[in-house]
Image: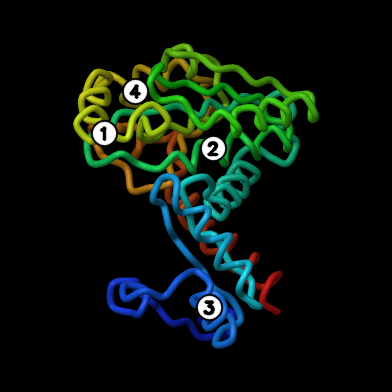
Amino acid sequence: MAQLGGHAAFIESKSTQISHGDTEKEIGDILGRYFDGIAIRHCDYGIGNRYLNLVAEAARAPILNMQCDVYHPHQCLADLMTIWEKKGRNLRGKKIVVSWAYAASYAKPMSVPQSLILQMPRFGLDVTLAHPPEFELMPDIMEQAREQARKYKTGFEVVDSMEEGFKDADIVYAKSWGPLVTTSDPDEIKKVTQKYESWITDERKMALAKEDSIYMHPLPADRNIEVTDGVIDGPHSVVFDEAENRLHAQKAVMALTMS
């Protein structure tokens, strides 16, 4: 906001009236009068996207989705910008693998892989989604992704092997997400996740991708658990350019929606 000549206020739910009963309607109606835009991050599964939409219904200002339980649009825009920078604008026939990776920190949202499989077919990329059986994405998102692939005449396949997914990939996008479609029980989530510690992005798996492939991750990554230092700091990695592009992509959206 400062780079665009504006001012921002950070509002944390625990220290405001949100924690004392202000509903989505109050937040949208009141903050929509105070500000020219409202950016919300709410990733709680089954709650976040609904919350954002209810705020949007009540607000006169645009609502910017900074990540919810279903989508992560600004990250996906930055990802596309990065891919264009590294692979050019004509992506027809190139393969992106969106792969689950092991992480022990917490059950991360599904919003990044879901946004990727929805958006990338629109720009000509063939998508391979790789994950263990328990880590399926939302069924309606999967159907939408297949429809996008049919509409834009791109490939879309699902595999249950990280190695198979990485084979001949131009773009490797490997990150963790929780088995939230399968279970909401914390103990079961931990038990299921621990079965797949071998799903780490390492040099051996990267060697299965094309020689000029790029490695992407939205960060933060669980180093040497989700991805080895050799990969994330290695010649294939574009994660810091990708992180920088979050700034540029989000400024673009704000300029378009708030000017």
Residue type, mark 2 in image: Gln
Query: Of marks 3 and 2, which one's residue comes earlier in the chain?
Result: 3
Q: What distance separates the C-alpha of mark 4 from that of mark 2?
A: 26 Å
Answer with the quarter of the image where residue 17 lies.
bottom left
- Residue 22 is labelled as none
- What residue is rendered at 27% in x and 36% in y? 229
Residue type, mark 3 in image: Met
Residue type, mark 1 in image: Asp
Residue 114: x %, y % from top left: 54, 37
- Residue 185 is labelled as 1
Query: Of marks 4 and 2, which one's residue comes earlier in the chain?
Result: 2
Q: What distance separates the C-alpha of mark 1 from that of mark 3?
A: 39 Å
Query: Is 254 placed left or right of 242 in the picture?
Result: right
Residue type, mark 4 in image: Glu
Q: What distance separates the C-alpha of mark 3 from that of mark 2?
A: 27 Å
- Residue 203 is labelled as 4
In the rendered image of this protein, does residue 139 appear above or below residue 74? above
Query: Of marks 4 and 3, which one's residue comes earlier in the chain?
Result: 3
